[in-house]
Image (cartoon, rainbow, N blue to C red):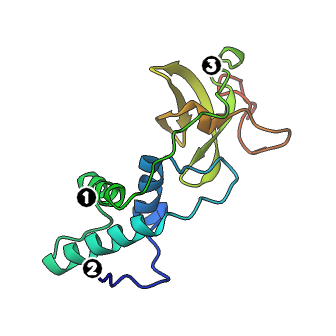
Amino acid sequence: MKHRMPEDYKIPDDPDVGRMDAAYLRSCLGLRAQPGEEPPQLPTAVRRAHYDMARSLSILGAMGNGMTPTQLATVVALALREGVQPKDEEPTYSFQDDLAKYGQKVVIYWRNKDRAAHFLQTADDRVRVLHDGNERSIRPDLVRFPKEGEFPEVEENINQTTEV
């Protein structure tokens, strides 16, 4: 079968506009990047399957702002049939919640950036944090304590009294 995918085809990966197909595919295949690292390139078979699926959806008028989870699962299944092997994920480090206090400043890696948040609790193998006024449930490997002087504009603890 002849494939029509251009050599320079890139799967959309822009969290600011909601098109995160590449990030979801990396997660499914165990190809996540560690915080601060450049995300790895997706295999050609995955890019080819995504291109074919996106092209078919576009012809049918069913392409929106990125693919749905079902469509992305179909892309993964097609890539697996072509011989792509998912990597087993091994967590390299885990957030030490026993050292954190309620309301303490932490750093989360969310939407491809380090962002300041405040620790709330751990529940169901996830870390609950407060970020920009919203509670979020984050994987422990994406939460860390801030380095010295990191995010100085954010309070060290949300329970501290502030002077006006």
For marks 3 and 1, the one nearer the N-term is 1
* Foreground label between 1 and 2: 2
**Crowding at label 2, few (<14), some or many (≥20) Cα neighbours within 10 Å?**
few
- What residue is shown with label 1? 71
Identity of the residue drawn at 81% across and 39% down: 147
Q: Report, in whole angstroms, how far the alpha carbon at label 3 lies from the one at label 1.
A: 39 Å
Q: Toward the viewer: 33 or 114?
A: 33
- What residue is shown with label 3? 102
Q: Toward the viewer: 73 or 111?
A: 73
Q: Residue 67: percent from the left, percent from the top?
A: 29, 62
Secondary structure under the numbered disc 1 in the rendered image: helix
Q: Toward the viewer: 164 or 50?
A: 50
Identity of the residue drawn at 26% across and 56% down: 74
Q: Residue 55: percent from the left, percent from the top?
A: 26, 78
| Left or right for 28, reference 147 | left
The amino acid pointed to by label 3 is Tyr
- What residue is shown with label 2? 1
Question: Looking at the rendering, which quadrant does residue 101 occupy?
Answer: top right
For marks 2 and 3, the one nearer the N-term is 2
